[in-house]
Image (cartoon, rainbow, N blue to C red):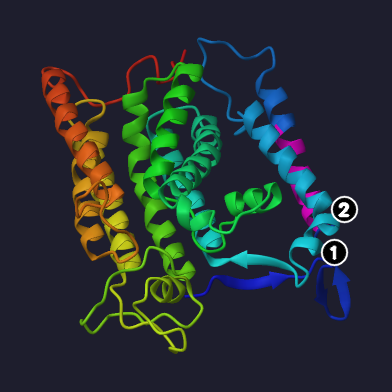
Amino acid sequence: MRQVLFRIPWEGISLGGVTLPLFGFGLLFWVLLAVLTGGVWLGLRSAGPASSKNSAPAATDSPFDIGSMLFWLFALILVVQARVIGPRMAPEGLPIFGYGVMLLIGLTTAVFAADWRARSEGLPPETIWDLAIWLFIPGIIGARIFYLVQYRDRVFTGVENLPQFVWATVNLSEGGIVLYGGLLAGAAAYFTFCAVKKLPPLQLADIITPSVFIGIGFGRIGCLLNGCCYGDACTLPWGLEFPAQSVPFLALVERGFLAPDALHTPPLHPTQIYAALDGFFIAALTWWYYGVRRVPGDVLGLALLISPLTRFLIEILRGDEYGQWGTTLTISQWVSVALFTTGLLFQIYLSRQAHGVRGGLPSNLKPSVT
């Protein structure tokens, strides 16, 4: 595991004896300003008088809407204020967390994959990029809220005042998000997006479903780097030992399963790797299934059957959660049962829709060409 990959000094990076400033009004400021300015310019250009609701979107369509603009503007403000606020929180420099890097890689790969599929179906290019912003932020917030509710006793132990409460709420350094919370919040944001943009949700869901699991796969690699979502004791050759003061080590010491002076944990199931492989497998399967789907929503329906089942099985090997409500089932297993049941009901609906219905994009999603 490697929670912090490296740190970036707040003053900048030294190159050949010269310090290149990154924060404040340094390099990052000008890069973000160029991105924001370019997005505004493309947006204004594509909204010109040549546009017509009966014509195909211009090749210069901007991958930005107002929400995206606000996101980049917020990032710009953070970069400017980083040299003032940053040293107070992390005197040694900006920590680049392994988990965050994998989330970024997963998000970027997922968006490009969905964008490629959407373009091949004639979907306007800015749709996927706008959707990514709509899903990412609510997803992180939902995943964090789910974690705070599930582990509230652990998170808020010793909290005595408001600043401590706020820090405990936002501190993600020891692992602190739950996938299902992100998916549930993301689903709410997704249907809101479709309603605002007047897009058919099932057709679009088929396009982005493989990308969701691409993101999950990379995110689980981030879990391995962070040390969270660890497994139970493992006697197999690939069992992983985590060092002292790691997330699994401290948790096992707190539970009385490990002596505080131990050098490392006993071998544990690498459930993070199991989950990553599971995510990539479902991504590949649903990507292939898109070409043979029966009706709109079929790809999503397949994922709703397979993903809860594999998650339920992986949870059996997890060592970081206990059973809930007087059972041996964890919260994630209970959610998996609910999602699998939803998937079965959804399959009944899809079967009734399958008579004479194609799985392609309907005419109101595809742009018409005159």
Contact (Cβ within 8 Å) of mark 1 with mark 2: yes
**Left or right for 176, reference 88:** left
The quadrant in which residue 219 appears is bottom left
Q: Residue at x 34, y 80 (%)?
A: 240
**Left or right for 129, reference 321:** right
Q: Is residue 310 above or below residue 246?
A: above
Q: CA distance from mark 1 to mark 2?
A: 8 Å
Q: Which residue is mark 2?
A: 25
Nearer to us in this view, 323 or 336: 323
List x then y, in percent, for residue 273: 33, 67
Q: Is residue 36 one of those drawn in magenta? A: yes
Q: Residue at x 78, y 59 (%)?
A: 86
Q: Amino acid at mark 2?
A: Phe
Q: Is residue 331 above or below residue 98?
A: above
**Left or right for 208, reference 52:** left
Q: Amino acid at mark 1?
A: Pro
Q: Which residue is mark 1?
A: 21
List x then y, in percent, for residue 120: 39, 35
